[in-house]
Amino acid sequence: MPHGGDATDREPGGGANLIGRRLVHVVHLQHGGQRHGVDTMTPGGHDEHGLTVSHEDQGVRDLPHLDAQRGRGLLCRASAVVEGSHPALRAEACEGLAHPDDGLLFGDLTHAASVAGHNGGMPSPAGRRKAQVDSPPRFEGFPAEAFDFYTALEVNNTRPWWQEHKAQYEQSVRGPLVSLLSELEEEFGTPHVFRPYRDARFSKDKSPIKDHQGGVVNVEDAIAYYLQVSASGIMIAGGWYAPEGQQIARFRESVVGPAGAELERILAGMARTWRMDGNLLKTRPRGYDADHPRIELLRHRRLTVARDYAVEPWLGTRKALTTVRTQWRAMRPLIEWLADYVGPAGDPSDDA
């Protein structure tokens, strides 16, 4: 998951305000005389991929991170003319594009690659040809060799062994993971697959290769969907994994307000089937009473959920793809709550 802090505008009366972070745009993609789709774009001139956006009837959905000067209470209709179908213009309304992020989720999440630049907002003909050539193959499952690779790595984590088995890693681990995430890109956003190498500079363990392979789709700073492959199987996870700047303060303000009840409902619905981690404070956070009705939530310094799937034959089929899609959809209410109320690391008003 790649990609600190911020201050949010507050409405009088306290609690998390209702000044929206993300604009809801009805985007008309005019191509060949036809119009398509609904999407979310960055306010003001261009979307995050460089596509020109004209703002008419602008407006926002009430969420906590957009300052009033950027269009509170308006209705936005952005028009963009694009050549061909662009992934950034196929996202679901209110689904933010991927952002670079910094941090750790389950020991692996670091900066994700930024969205690639485009030629004036349009892929060049050469770029389109390259995209077609480089398009990953259809996902057909994680072969048994993927899990065998990590089992063998446990007792052979050396550079010579890695060089001898790197091709197995590329073919059985990284390749299928890239294919799977590519098939989910249209619904969830631009994925990033992490490098296999450990940063052992400050560790007594000098093993060069990670004992797992992770992939991530970033929704907001330190908020993402996550998938991991290891010797034990796969882990499907997501959430807010590495607090930055004022994210913790914003989280606590939201928890004590009406949005806190919504979060409680979301987590209650996930409690039976998801493993949760909050990196809890040992005591109450400063400024809050120990008997506060939501004191347990207020002790959180992150909020992630995960499900583990052991190695079984179905992981070698397309059922692995449908399982990841289903479980990412199941965690979407939590991801969206976090994106809306925890929000970006920086103060959005700084960009105004």
Image: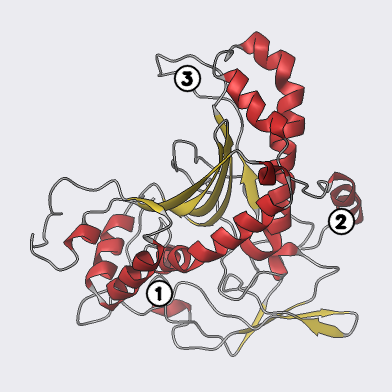
Query: Is the residue 288 above or below the residue 34 in the image?
Result: above
Q: CA distance from mark 1 to mark 2?
A: 35 Å
Given residues 288 and 169, the one toward you in this image is: 169
Q: Which residue: 81% across, 46% down?
A: 136
Given residues 116 and 191, the one toward you in this image is: 191
Q: Amino acid at mark 3?
A: Ala
Residue under label 3, please give it.
Answer: 200
Q: CA distance from mark 2 to mark 3?
A: 40 Å
**Residue 97, image x, y percentages:** 60, 62
Q: Is residue 117 visible?
A: no
Would residue 304 be found to the left or right of residue 24 on screen?
left
Residue under label 2, please give it.
Answer: 124
User: Upstream in the sequence, badge 1 or badge 3?
Assistant: 1
Q: Secondary structure at mark 2?
A: loop
Residue under label 1, please give it.
Answer: 67
Q: Which residue: 45% across, 50% down?
A: 306
Q: Which residue: 81% across, 71% down?
A: 82
**Mark 3 burial class by Cα count in 10 Å: few <14, some 14-19, many 20+:** few
